[in-house]
Image (cartoon, rainbow, N blue to C red):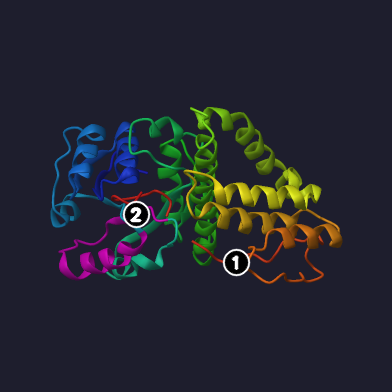
Amino acid sequence: MPPRLGIGIIGAGRVGAVLGAALRAEGHAITGVYAVSDVSRHRAADLLPGVPVLGVQEIVERSEVVLLAVPDDQLGPLAEGIAVGVDVPGGQLFVHVSGRHGTEVLAPLRALGCGVIALHPAMSFTGTAVDLPRLVGCPVAVTAHGTLEAVAQALVVEIGAEPVPIAEGDRVQYHAALAHGANHLVVLVSQARDLLRGIGIEDPGAYLRPLLTAALEESLRRGDAALTGPVPRGDAGTVAAHLAAIEEAEGASDDTAESYRALARAAARRAGLSPTDARRVLAALEPASAPRTTPHASQGSGASPAATDASDHPHHEEHA
């Protein structure tokens, strides 16, 4: 890598502005930032003081590297729009930070002679200086081809992060895993907070922290073996009582009982229950108005169900 690069940023969302600040701290020059909303402009001013807010054309003209930090669904149209509507000198490096996409989404720019790289830090961004030390040791998915793979890894290492190669065809499954784990964890914790707040616990987050911290650490280390509680014990009566309480709880969102049912069913299939206990737990999870169904014999066998695709990660321009 050259000692200094001129790097332009299109999208001053939570990720773009933070990565720009991290690269600037390593001696690279930030040539300009494209930011539309007031929130993005304020973020750019905080994290990239003195960097001019410019149009896309000016950023492309001024920069050796262009960082595209926009929502997943906007990335393809943006790449096409730059290739068709902007005077691209060629020979530049375009880097995007979408988890879902590999490098093919930037094919219109590659056709103009530009290098293309996909990077995705596996962390949740606040869009503040707090994120900068969190980048140290953070795994970053890298998708690049040929000599550009070494360039991509060097950029990641420069900011203290850990490059992890991800194949082009694996990006969607990779991103689904992160989004399902992180984003849906937030929903689950929020629902639990609501239930505790509903019975008068003033700081439900503090109350949950020891339990959830231990559960997270154990599940990261042991997977399904970390399961505890009424479902793996086969306590169908407790499961039914939980659902009744949730459905009557004041302040609980309407989706809490639905989430409890879905996750408890998944837990029952992963917990290694006996066929009898599995049937009792799954029957307790049926809505009162629904007909009771007999689960397949495979339920309760302890085998994990086949993975299915699901898919942001708080990233990029106002979507982070």
Q: According to the image, label 2 marks what residue?
A: 95
Between 121 and 193, the residue placed more toward the observer is: 193
- Please indicate, yes or no, whether residue 132 appears anywhere in the rendered image: yes
Residue 39 placement, left or right of 132: left
Residue 276 lies, in percent from the top left, at: 86, 61
Residue kind at label 2, given as amino acid type: Val
Residue 41 placement, left or right of 267: left
Residue 294 lies, in percent from the top left, at: 77, 71
Q: Is residue 88 magenta?
A: yes
Q: According to the image, label 1 marks what residue?
A: 308
Q: Nearer the viewer, mark 1 or mark 2?
A: 1
Q: Which residue: 48% across, 27% down?
A: 202
Neighbour tally class for label 1: few under 14, some 14-19, many 20 plus, Cα within 10 Å: few
Q: Earlier in the sequence, mark 1 or mark 2?
A: 2
Disc ID at residue 131 = none
**Residues shaded magenta:** 72-98
